C-alpha cells in the first residue's frame, strides 16, 4: 500500500456527504463519535482514609551535612528512604553519616542546582496540598468499590530528580504505597527537554502530559498496571486487548475524566481516532497486524509514540490500544455480570474479541 492509498483510506468518510442527505449525516457522525464506557456506581457513602506523605517538605529543607535531620527522615520513613536512595537516586555507600561515600554523594545530590530547581517548582506548582489530596479521594472510592479485597494505598509525594513518575512498594506499615514523582508533573512550560535532551521520555509528545491534569490519572494508572499484570501473549491482539482492559479499568476509576486525558492524547488526536475507527481497523487487517509479534512492526500501535506507523501524521500512537479499549467496552456491555476482577482474569484475548461482536 503506497502513501496515496493510505491517505485515501483514511479519508473515506469524506465521500459520505455525496451519498447521504443532511439529517442522516448528522446521525451517523453522532454515532461514530460516541464512545461507550463504564457506568459509574454511586460511591458517595464509601469511606477511604489514605495517608498522604509529602516527603519534599522534609527533603527540600535539608542542607549539606545536615545528617541529624536526614536520620530523622530515615527513621520516620525507613522503607521509602531506602528505596529512594538506592533505586531511584542510585547513591552509593551505606546509608549512614559514618560512610563518607554516601555522605559525599548525598551532599552532591541535595546541593545540585537542577535538584534545587525541581524542589522550587514542585513547591510552587503544588502549594495547595489539600487540593491534590482531595483529587485522589473519589478515584479511591471507586477503587474500593471495584476491588474491596485490595487495601487503599498510601501516597508518598516526592522529588525523584527526573528519575521516575510513579513506583509501588510496601511501606513500613506493610501497606501498599505509591510513590509519586511530582517532578514529572510540573506543566508544559517546564523545560524538560533542555534538562535531559537525549531521553525520549522527555520528548514533546510525552512531556505534554507532564502536568497537574494528568497527575491523578497517571498515578492511578500505575495502580491498575500492578493489579492487571502483564499481557499473556506477545501478538498485537494480545497487547491491544490487554491494554484496552487496563484503560477500561482506569476509566472505571476515573469516570469523569475525559477520554483524551486517560489516553494521553490531545483533543484533536482523540477526535481523529473516533472519526477513523473503521480506517484504523481496515489498516490493521490489510497489514496483517493482529497476530504479528515482531516488536518493530507493532510498537507504535501499542506503546507511546508520536504517531502510528503507516497512518497519517495526525494519528497519535497507541491506536491499537484505543481499539482494544473499544473492544473491551463492547465486551463488558454484552457481559454485564462480568466485574473488573473477572475481566482481569480473562486472558484469552481472542475470546474477548469474539464475544464482543465488535464492529468499528
Image (spheres, rainbow, N blue to C red):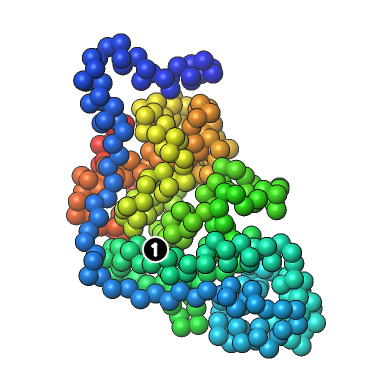
Q: Relative to the observer, which residue lies in front, 82 or 155?
A: 155
Question: Which of 52/356 is in front?
Answer: 52
Question: What residue sits right under mark 1 in the picture?
Answer: 135
The image quarter containing residue 101 is bottom right
Q: Residue at x 29, y 27 (%)?
A: 29
- Pick out the residue farthest to the top: 18
Question: Secondary structure under badge 1?
Answer: helix
Pick the front one: 95 or 240: 95
Look at the image and tell me in which quarter the C terminus lies: top left
Residue 357 in percent (x, y) is at 25, 36
Please say whether residue 104 is visible from this viewpoint. Answer: yes
Judge left or right: residue 227 versus residue 101: left
Q: Residue at x 80, y 82 (%)?
A: 100
- Residue found at x 23% / y 66%: 44
How far across and down, in percent of the image, does residue 236 sit?
45, 40
Left or right relative to 61: residue 354: left
Amino acid at each position: 500500500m503506497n502513501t496515496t492509498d493510505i491517505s485515501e483510506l483514511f479519508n473515506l468518510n469524506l465521500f459520505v456527504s455525496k451519498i447521504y442527505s443532511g439529517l442522516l449525516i448528522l446521525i451517523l457522525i453522532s454515532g461514530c463519535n460516541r464512545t461507550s464506557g463504564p457506568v459509574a456506581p454511586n460511591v458517595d457513602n464509601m469511606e477511604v482514609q489514605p495517608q498522604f506523605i509529602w516527603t519534599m517538605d522534609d527533603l527540600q529543607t535539608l542542607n549539606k551535612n545536615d545528617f541529624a535531620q536526614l536520620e530523622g527522615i530515615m527513621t520516620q520513613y525507613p522503607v521509602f528512604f531506602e528505596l529512594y536512595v538506592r533505586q531511584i537516586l542510585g547513591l552509593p555507600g551505606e546509608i549512614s553519616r559514618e560512610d563518607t561515600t554516601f555522605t559525599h554523594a548525598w551532599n552532591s545530590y541535595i546541593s545540585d542546582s537542577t535538584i534545587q530547581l525541581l524542589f522550587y517548582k514542585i513547591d510552587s506548582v503544588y502549594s495547595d496540598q489539600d487540593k491534590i489530596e482531595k483529587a485522589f479521594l473519589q478515584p479511591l472510592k471507586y477503587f474500593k468499590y471495584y476491588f474491596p479485597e485490595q487495601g487503599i494505598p498510601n501516597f508518598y509525594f516526592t522529588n525523584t530528580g527526573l528519575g521516575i513518575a510513579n513506583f509501588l512498594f510496601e511501606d513500613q506499615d506493610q501497606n501498599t504505597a505509591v510513590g509519586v514523582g511530582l517532578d514529572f508533573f510540573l506543566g508544559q512550560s517546564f523545560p524538560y527537554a533542555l534538562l535531559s535532551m537525549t531521553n525520549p521520555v522527555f520528548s514533546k509528545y510525552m512531556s505534554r502530559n507532564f502536568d497537574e491534569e494528568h497527575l491523578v490519572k497517571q498515578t492511578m494508572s500505575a495502580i491498575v498496571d500492578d493489579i492487571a499484570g502483564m499481557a499473556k501473549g506477545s501478538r498485537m491482539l494480545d497487547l491491544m486487548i490487554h491494554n484496552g482492559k487496563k484503560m477500561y479499568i482506569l476509566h472505571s476509576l476515573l469516570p469523569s475524566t475525559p477520554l483524551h486525558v486517560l489516553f494521553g492524547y490531545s483533543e484533536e488526536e482523540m477526535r481523529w481516532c473516533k472519526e477513523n475507527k473503521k480506517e484504523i481497523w481496515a489498516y490493521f487487517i490489510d497489514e496483517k497486524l493482529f497476530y504479528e509479534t515482531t516488536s518493530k512492526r507493532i510498537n507504535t500501535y501499542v506503546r507511546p509514540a508520536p504517531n502510528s506507523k503507516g497512518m497519517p501524521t495526525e494519528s497519535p500512537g497507541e491506536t491499537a490500544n484505543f481499539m482494544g479499549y473499544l473492544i473491551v467496552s463492547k465486551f463488558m456491555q454484552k457481559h454485564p455480570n462480568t466485574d473488573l476482577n473477572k475481566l482481569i482474569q480473562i486472558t484469552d484475548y481472542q475470546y474477548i474479541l469474539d464475544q464482543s461482536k465488535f464492529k468499528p
